[in-house]
Amino acid sequence: MNRRQFLIACHLSLIALQSLAWGSPGELIEVDPNCPPDAFKEAMKYLRQMRAAEKPTNAEEKLKNGRAWLAGAEVEDLQPGEKSYWVEEPKSGGRLRVLVPSGKLKGAVLAIHGGGWALGTALSDEKRNWALARRIQAAVVSPDYRLAPEHPFPAGPDDCEAAARWLLDNSLNVPQLAITGGSAGSHLAALTLCRLKPEERARFKSAALFYGVFDLGRSDVWRNGDNSDFPDLSPEDMDRYLNYFVPDKTDEQRRDSRYSPLYADLREMPPALFMVGTADLLASDSRRMARKWADAGNRAVLVEYPGAPHGFNGYEVDCGLNPEVYMADFIAESWS
């Protein structure tokens, strides 16, 4: 083994050790992703250029354009023995997208898409969900939840809870469950866990929450930030999405635990992984939620990527610790 091979082996061993560093209940583990400081420099430059080039438009046009942008389904070629299908969920009347890899299943993951509670579909993360399904040998179920503003709170959370209960009814005949989501999907994942009884939550062995919004009452950074500081998700964007999802409410009213999981009783929650970029408007939400998760007596891991924007795992850059792989391994370890 030469020196380069040795260093690579040591680096991979370090990642393996980090992935096992669950800590004790009540302890917040902070993992350094070894991300180069300028890894997202070009991505941020591109986002600022896109923001500057935006033409003035009203909220209705922004919603229409956003939905059109996310409307295209990701196409994935199935491998032998794999299957994908839709299920009509009888309790909510909504649909579930189910991905099943070949071979014996080790569990199932409820994967909730983001989009400010107003954009996206169960097909939005199809490629990413297939990668997760194959890596950990698990079914991945994504709810096609109703969107705001046509269907404000509690429609989306109700649909996600119904999807969780569909899995709890052992509809896929799997021994273990996990839950994940990004952005608004992360909020809905946390809210779903809050709605379940402790004995129901116990079936979910882990939660992987990417750049989530957990305080709908808005933190100070939302109000003080400039749109150019957060080109991928601005304070103006968040205000618009909040008014779609929970209309006619003050910040104080939105801090009710029915809307904001940060203020909920977080005792007896599964181990949770929080991943966020430091250039994300919602960075403080992940930090505060990870701390409160741990303070409630649960295991919590926080990974912050320096200079990364909202939705950072959608950019093909060398950011050190691969967020998708780390998330998948985190879930797999919770099942071991």
Image (tube, helix red, strand yellow):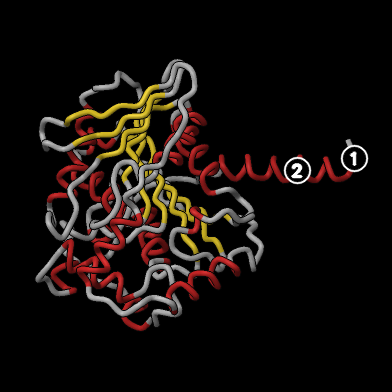
Residue at 64% of width from left, 68% of height from top?
Answer: 38
Question: Which mark is in front, 2 or 1?
Answer: 1
Distance between the alpha carbons at the discs numbered 2 and 1: 12 Å
Quarter holding residue 122: top left
Residue 320: x %, y % from top left: 64, 53
Q: Which residue is mark 1?
A: 2
- Is residue 4 toward the left or the right of residue 244 in the image? right
Q: Residues within 10 Å of mark 2 (few under 14, many from 20)?
A: few
Q: Is residue 78 placed above or below 123 in the rendered structure? A: above
Residue at 37% of width from left, 35% of height from top?
Answer: 205
The residue type indicated by label 1 comes to: Asn
Nearest the viewer among 210 and 16 is 210
Which mark identifies residue 10? 2
Nearest the viewer among 139 and 258 is 139
Which mark identifies residue 93? none
Residue 224: x %, y % from top left: 36, 83
Residue 83: x %, y % from top left: 38, 22
Residue 136: x %, y % from top left: 49, 29
Q: Quadrant of the N terminus?
A: top right
